[in-house]
Image (cartoon, rainbow, N blue to C red):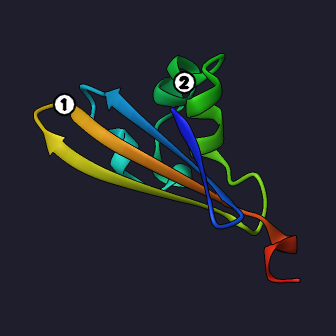
Amino acid sequence: PASYVSGDYVTETLVYDESGEIMRPPEARSPAWRVRAQGRPHFNSIQKPIGPGHRVHVAAMGGAWFWVEQIFQDADADD
């Protein structure tokens, strides 16, 4: 689900990742993880920031579950 808050879009996704690699920085994830993530739009944006106003925060929820929050800041919101 996505929501619009004060000029920013916030997308939250519950992710199941047995490897736990989603907690690593994008450049530290294995090639095998990247292959599994291909074709999944929410994983593609987690792998590489879309722009300077894109932030990704991953929190462990227990076991192999992770909560991923992405914030897409609207550069024009401050104007």
Answer above or below: position of 32 versus 74. Answer: above
Q: Which residue is located at x 75 percent, y 51 percent?
A: 50
Q: Residue furthest bottom?
A: 79
Looking at the rendered image, the quarter that the C terminus falls into is: bottom right
The local secondary structure at tag 2 comes to: helix
Q: Position of residue 59 (x, y in %)?
A: 28, 52
Left or right: 66, with 30 as reference point: left
Camera-nearest residue between 31 and 9 = 9
User: Callout 1: 10 Å neighbours few (<14), some, many (20+)?
Assistant: few
Q: Nearer the viewer, residue 50 or 38?
A: 50
The image quarter containing residue 19 is top left
How packed is label 2: few (under 14 Cα within 10 Å), some, or many (20 or more)? some
Mark carried by residue 79: none
x and y percent of residue 36 in the render? 51, 18
| Amino acid type, callout 2 | Ala
**Towards the viewer: 45 or 12:** 12
Q: Amino acid at mark 1?
A: Ala
Look at the numbered discs 1 and 2 and tell me whether their residues touch, using CB distance below 8 Å. Answer: no
Q: To which residue does mark 2 refer? A: 37
**Whole-number angstrom distance, CA of label 1 to CA of label 2:** 16 Å
Q: Which residue is at 80% across, 73% downward?
A: 77
Q: Which mark is residue 64?
A: 1
Name the residue: 64% across, 67% down.
6
Residue 38 located left or right of residue 31:
right
Residue 63, how many percent across, how many down? 10, 33
Left or right, residue 14 beside residue 37: left
Classify mark 1: helix, strand or loop. loop
State the image quarter where residue 57 is shown. bottom left
Q: Earlier in the sequence, mark 1 or mark 2?
A: 2
